[in-house]
Image (cartoon, rainbow, N blue to C red):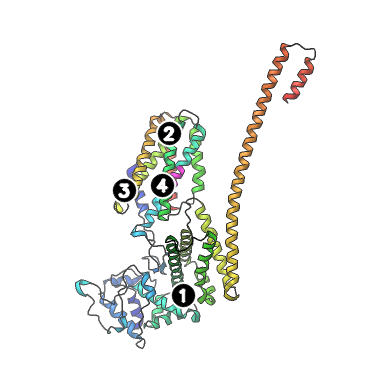
Amino acid sequence: SAGGTGAQNLSVTEQGRFSSSSKDRTLVRCQQYPPLRTLQASAALRAASDEHKKEPWASSSQQHFESPPAEHQPEEKPQGPHPSYTGQGGQESEDYESEEQLQHRILTAALEFVPEHGWTAEAIAEGAKTLGLSVAAAGLFHSDGSELILHFVSDCNTKLTELLKKEQKLVQLGEAEKKPIDEFLRDAVEARLRMLIPYIEKWPQALSVLLLPRNIPSSLSLLTSMIDDIWHYAGDQSTDFNWYTRRAVLTAIYNTTELVMMQDSSPGFEDTWRFLENRVADAMAMSNTATQVQSTGEAVVQGLMGAAVTVSNAGTCRAVTAEFLLNVSICFPNPNLENNMEKLSSFVT
Amino acid sequence: MAAAVVPALRCSLLQRWPHRCGPGVRAVPGAGAALRPCSSRVAQDGINQPVIDRIIRVDHAGEYGANRIYAGQMAVLGRSSVGPVIQQMWNQEKNHLKKFNELMVAYRVRPTVLLPFWNVAGFVLGAGSALLGKKGAMACTVAVEESISEHYNNQIRTLIEEDPEKYKELLQVIKQFRDEEQEHHDIGLEHDAEATPAYSVLKTAIQLGCKAAIFLSERI
């Protein structure tokens, strides 16, 4: 159908970039087709559901792109070939949008429907509808909602990083106090977990999808970079094995707290925050204990070395004294020489 | 020998790694089915993060290892006639390590997991070579410093190929350190390193170990 082929062509951008969609490797051939067809197809896709002419612009997606988003009001443009494709000076037309940007917009719009439909293709289809696209746009993504979940996680991590950056600026400007480490970690993890609250009902489903072997590289990379960000803004400057220990500990805290949150039914998730506080306190205590054990160990080693030196000195001392007394007793012949020798030998031993 | 090593090292350094791109979900070409979401860490002023990562990680590991080697040598030969010489070289290595610690924090590079291992291995190598006598210690120094000089030269080449202007500070640091390692190498030769029994065998073995250490530290 036109909608179907439109969706496939949609995934080939004007520059003929290789599509990351696994749908059809033969899309590479589309690089040879005149790029105008792509825009025609995308216009057709948009026009397919003509009742939705809403402004789709999601300002939150703006900050996520390094290339300037070129699309402004696609719904207002007329259907059919776009005369401004070549534009002035060979520049791209105003409503040119990369595949990535479009996918990003669809996923952002789909998040609104997740509490109702879960992390599924239905939610993506609904999101596409609000943008004025055909529901076939959901075909751009996997049916298990992996991309939607990964998009959401990535989004949350970005928001967390910005929050931490803002706090850091305030501290640098002297407008806020520098938090102690345990409080900082607690607040950062809590802020990140609070972003799950609107989707908490369906989050267990999302976690299970994230653990699929196919998604593990991406989800692991997102998790590790988030934990690294938190430690970086907490002021961690370790360059030895501590770097790994700290991140491992914080990852464990985050994961366990997330799981507790899934099962928490207390008002305002206060059980979860209390659990988090206790775990962070445990981690601090553990690190203090580790430092203490290390210094105790060093002290014990020093003590042993000192004792060894003393004993060896004492041994030498005794041997020297024994020699001296022997020489003295030879100089002064004594009927009790045997007694003396016995005494000396017992002294030496 | 250097000519054969250079292309291999250069290839490994410039290997395509997924770039730490900006926030959001990105389609990484050839990444396979799903969109590959990137971390929220933004590339600092467009530097080639994976390459810089590797460079700083392996250099940090190298200086850390060199530190431990000299510590091992001092433990055995500290009170001998070459003690002051080794102490002076050790002090310079300590400075190098301090500089790389700073760079590591500035570029947010993770240290290699093998650090505890290099801790022990370096000390054992230093102490072991020192037990072979003063010449043995000097032979170990010559072998290690030659490996490190060559390695730094490769890195300088890589950075110059990438963009000499962008990496000016890093290039300066590496050039200075390479010159100092070369000095150590010459000091080792001055102190009769080549007179060690089984010098060539010892040198080859140590240099093989260094190559393996460099390979591993870049990746793990």
Q: Residue at x 51, y 33 (%)?
A: B76
Q: Which residue is mark 2?
A: B139
In the rendered structure, which segment of residues is drawn in magenta?
B61-65
> Looking at this view, is A216 or B169 the one in front?
B169
Q: Are marks 4 and 2 on the same chain?
A: yes
Q: Which residue is mark 3?
A: B157
Q: Hey, what amino acid is under mark 1?
A: Gly
Report the chain holding disc 2. B
Separation of residues labelled 4 and 2 (CA atoms)? 26 Å
> Looking at this view, is B34 or A287 the one in front?
A287
Separation of residues labelled 3 and 4 (CA atoms)? 21 Å
Q: Residue at x 29, y 75 (%)?
A: A96
Q: Which residue is mark 1?
A: A145
x, y percentage for residue A102?
A: 36, 75
Q: Are marks 1 and 2 on the same chain?
A: no
Q: Which residue is mark 4?
A: B99
Report the chain holding disc 4. B
Q: Hey, what amino acid is under mark 4?
A: Lys
Prevalent SS, magenta region: helix
Q: Please, what secondary structure does the residue beneath circle 2 have?
A: helix
> In this rendering, is residue B56 above or below B189?
below
x, y percentage for residue A83?
A: 22, 80
Report the chain holding disc 1. A
Q: Residues within 10 Å of mark 3 (few under 14, many from 20)?
A: some
Q: Is residue A123 visible?
A: yes
Q: Hey, what amino acid is under mark 3?
A: Arg
Tell whether position A36 is magenta. no
Separation of residues labelled 4 and 1 (CA atoms)? 46 Å
Q: Quadrant of the N terminus of chain B?
A: top left
Q: Hey, what amino acid is under mark 2?
A: Ala
Q: Residues within 10 Å of mark 4 (few under 14, many from 20)?
A: some
